[in-house]
Image (cartoon, helix red, strand yellow):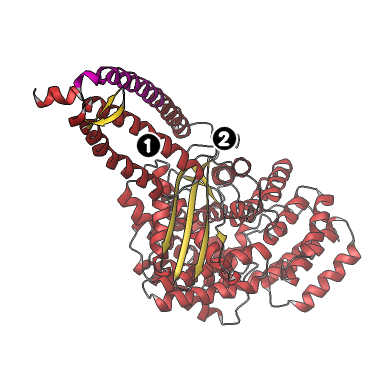
Amino acid sequence: MSLIAELKRRNVVRVGVAYIVIGWVLAQIAEFAFENFGAPDWVLKTVVVILLLGLPLALFFAWAFEMTPEGVKREKDVDRSQSITHSTARKLDFLIIAALVVALGYFVWERQSTVETAAVAEQADAPDSGEVSSDEPTARSIAVLPFVNMSSDQEQEWFSDGLTEELLNALARTPDLLVAARTSSFKFKGSTEDVPTIAKALGVAHILEGSVRRGGNQLRVTAQLIRASDGFHLWSQTYDRNPEDVIAIQEEIAINIATALETAMDPEALAKMVSSGTNSVAAYNAYLKGLAYGASTLSTGDTYTFLGARDSFEQAIALDPEFSLAYWKLADFWRIQLSETNIVAGIVEMPREEMQKRFDDAIEKAIATERDPVTVIRFRVLRAMQNMQLAQALRLNTEYLEQRPNDQDAQNRQLELLVDHSRDDELLAAIKEFQQRDGYDVVVVQASMTFLLISNDQQAIRDFVKTALERVGDSAFVMYQAHRALLWAGDIDGASQLSRLIQASDLPEVSRSTVSLRQACAENRIADATRIFEQLKTDYPDQTSIMWIIHRIMSRDQEAFEILKEFDKRDDLKPLGDFLSYAYFDARPFPNLMALLKAQGIEPREPLEIPYRCKI
């Protein structure tokens, strides 16, 4: 008998076909189950290897053994009259048919799921009215929840928070991936809410969660990408590495997530985009610590915590002199210190000339060391803004946002630049777009509330403040801006309730006193307002922006003008330009500022009256 005929007689072919079909079905079931239980990738790989190894064993047993009425016997010991190969063949045929039916059913179900997912993605990519519904989040949207610190040392909390923020920043660089704002995500730190509830609150289709355990020479990072609609794990991974591998882990997680969500970025471009910009783990750790300090300042209002961010970024640069992002963050620290209107300014006692030198040095080194040309645009925007090259800054920032629309720092600068250019219609459209695009970032929310006053639309202001307080109302800075916005919109009672929370916060005393002055004037408590005003004048005579603001609140407009008049005589007009963001600032009495603006094609808007100021 020929070999082929013998293989058929002994049912070797049928056994092989049945094994392959059933093995494929089992592999699909295993993949489905392991994804939902969050099993590591190696478990599924092990199952597949076992199934593959089992095939030659199954074929060997089919060849060497045979079924008889007396049970299984070796082929060479079988009396052909006792053989039941024909009966076995029929059973194997039925088994193969049943397995094929199951396989076909699974294939149809998987195909339908793929079609539905593609339809959702196509709908998300299609142009619409600009509305983004939280009930139907776009398919390529994600929130990064704070990674849980599993280390025995709770001082490592900064590491897990910093790693989370850098992951969020890396993902936000992907143009067609919508990423919920950091502050929105961190609101759920330690929350016991389930994934669908959190995703619905943040308006995203996917959640990334994970944990970090760090101790000695061991680092374990787990990450899970979860589809919110059904809780399925699209991707999960556990990294048991040395702490020196943290940079590679962060980049690998970001790339895997973007790939799993089928963004338009090719892997090579994506890898370049998410790169942290350093190969030094010590520098990267210092950078993460700086991010954590900055986030703490935004949350608590404790401005002196920001000094820790400066020290950390300087440490990162000392460890890696080519670390462009650390230079960028350090430059931004000095930009804030140079600002006349930023609450966090003034925490460093240093001549302005020296701070300007440090800013220039940091931003130039950031530009020189950065390898990504798109990120270089981002750095050039900051330099142009500090140099009052407003037209160039707006052009560059618009160009940057076309490629990185989810960058919340760039969104904030876009709002500021549109205000400086008096492009009010574009400003209001941008506020709406950024709010809908990726939730509520603390910095973007503050800018939006400040600049929304220009619309003088009381209902729109109230609606924005209400939602902002629901989403990021635990930020002291947001409360500070929301208090002014509520007074502007005529909600004196709501502002009064917020004032009490602000007084219990870690905001600087000067900011809390300014809130008290606003509230007193709004309630027409002139005696209280006068007392607070005089105390502020005594305690903070050198804080120019505060002196200008409180004089405007007290309707002492001429004195307010005198406070700023000297700024218009300086070569550096940036301190005076900082006041352009105020809806009630009038640029017209300052000839040098006006000349600078008009040279760039900017026509300042008509200033608005402060609706809550004291009528004296």
Residue 8 lies in what quarter of the image? Answer: top left
Circle 2: is it few (<14), some (14-19), or many (20+) Cα within 10 Å?
few
Q: Is residue 221 visible?
A: yes
Compared to residue 246, the image places residue 433 above or below, namely above
Left or right relative to 346: residue 499: right
According to the image, label 2 marks what residue? 131
Residue 563 lies in what quarter of the image? Answer: bottom right
Left or right relative to 9: residue 355: right
Q: Secondary structure at mark 1?
A: helix
Residue 101 within the magenta-colored segment of the rendering: yes
Q: Quadrant of the C terminus?
A: bottom right
- The rendered magenta stretch, by its main secondary structure, is classed as helix
* Magenta segment boundaries in residue numbering: 80-106
Residue 399 within the magenta-colored segment of the rendering: no
Q: Nearer the viewer, residue 270 or 413?
A: 270
Q: Are marks 2 and 1 in contact (CB under 8 Å)?
A: no
According to the image, label 1 marks what residue? 27
Decide which of tag 2 and tag 1 comes sooner along the chain: 1
Horizontal and vertical percent for residue 236? 45, 49
Compared to residue 370, the image places residue 103 above or below, namely above
